[in-house]
Amino acid sequence: MKPIGFIGVGFMGKPMARNLLRGGYTLIAHDVNRGGVQELVADGAREAFSPKEVAKAAEIIFTSLPSDQAVEEVVLGQNGIIEGVASESIVVETSTISPTTARNVAKKLALKGVEMLDAPLSGGVVGAEKATLSIMVGGKAEIFERVLPLLQKLGKNITHIGGQGTGQIAKAANQIIVALSIDAVAEALIFAKKAGADPAKVRKALLGGFAQSRVLEEHGQRMLDRNFEPGGKMRFHQKDIGIVLAIARELGIYLPGTSMMMDLWNAMTAQGMLDWDHSALVKVLEQMSNVEVRPG
């Protein structure tokens, strides 16, 4: 069996690629930052020096990249996947990008007889490390079934949404809920603290009620601990909300809460928080209310 290709072994890609290795698959990996690739080589992977080289060696190629532009360059650019890939190969695009970009890239690959799945992820670095990611997949059902055993090495909740681009639509919806939930948790803890209650005890009480959520559990604790080391970098969530708002404009729909979140992400950007965890949103709101949500 040919090796599995993996391009982009950074924040999310490296633990995903490692889980494929642990699952018994051989791997050929590439990244412009060679540090992550070298770690995988130490675990048994083989290094490639361009996306084209990966595509020549593999029939199934995963990509984990930071932006639409990066996806277009890696897949369609000079020395890109499209220059080395054989017909009947599959590209599994796990980045969060615009559905329009996903569909356009898929159409160009199809001209060479290559299939593509858009398969964005939710669950952050912890989910990538523990192979518990939620994976939302767009593309042909028969291609999804062919790749499913690989996806099961990466995540637990794996859903075929529909045709090309629908995985990205599901991920955009996910990012709306996560963003507004982070804001809701931050506002609730600030409210509790300013009104004279211990926010840690309020959080504990809320975890037993209808307000319980993973965001309250995990990000609420981060806010109390003042731990803003990135599990999910704000810069990527800001990018994702930008995708949501662009789609909303095209569709002529009104998303007031999502629009407000972009304003808050922009405020974080102005304060140099692009590479902080997105739960650091609480710091911007704390400044507006002149309070800090430390326990007690």
Image: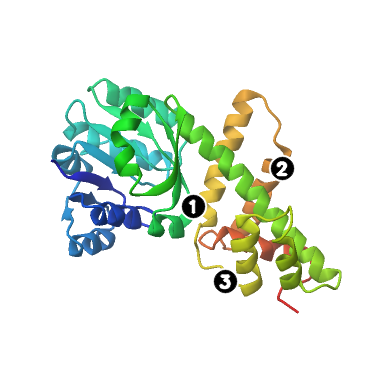
Residue type (three-letter) at the residue carrying disc 1: Gly
Which SS class for mark 1?
Answer: loop
- 197 displayed left or right of 149: right
- 204 displayed left or right of 88: right
Q: What is the x, y in percent for residue 189?
A: 75, 65
Residue 110 higher or lower than 220, as above or below? above
Visible residue check, residue 11: no
Q: Residue furthest top?
A: 111
Q: Alpha carbon of mark 2 to alpha carbon of mark 1: how far? A: 22 Å
Please name which of the two marks, 2 or 1, marks the residue nearer to the observer. 1
Which circle marks residue 257 in the picture? 2
Residue type (three-letter) at the residue carrying disc 3: Asn
Residue highlighted by disc 3: 227
Q: What is the x, y in percent for residue 137?
A: 42, 34
**CB contact under 8 Å: marks 2 and 1:** no
Q: Residue furthest bottom?
A: 296
Residue 285 higher or lower than 194, as above or below? above
Q: What is the x, y in percent for residue 101?
A: 43, 31
Residue drawn at x 76%, y 67% as measured from the top left: 202
Residue highlighted by disc 1: 123
* CA neighbours of label 3 inside 10 A, class few (<14), some (14 to 19), many (20+): some
Residue 89 higher or lower than 96, as above or below? above
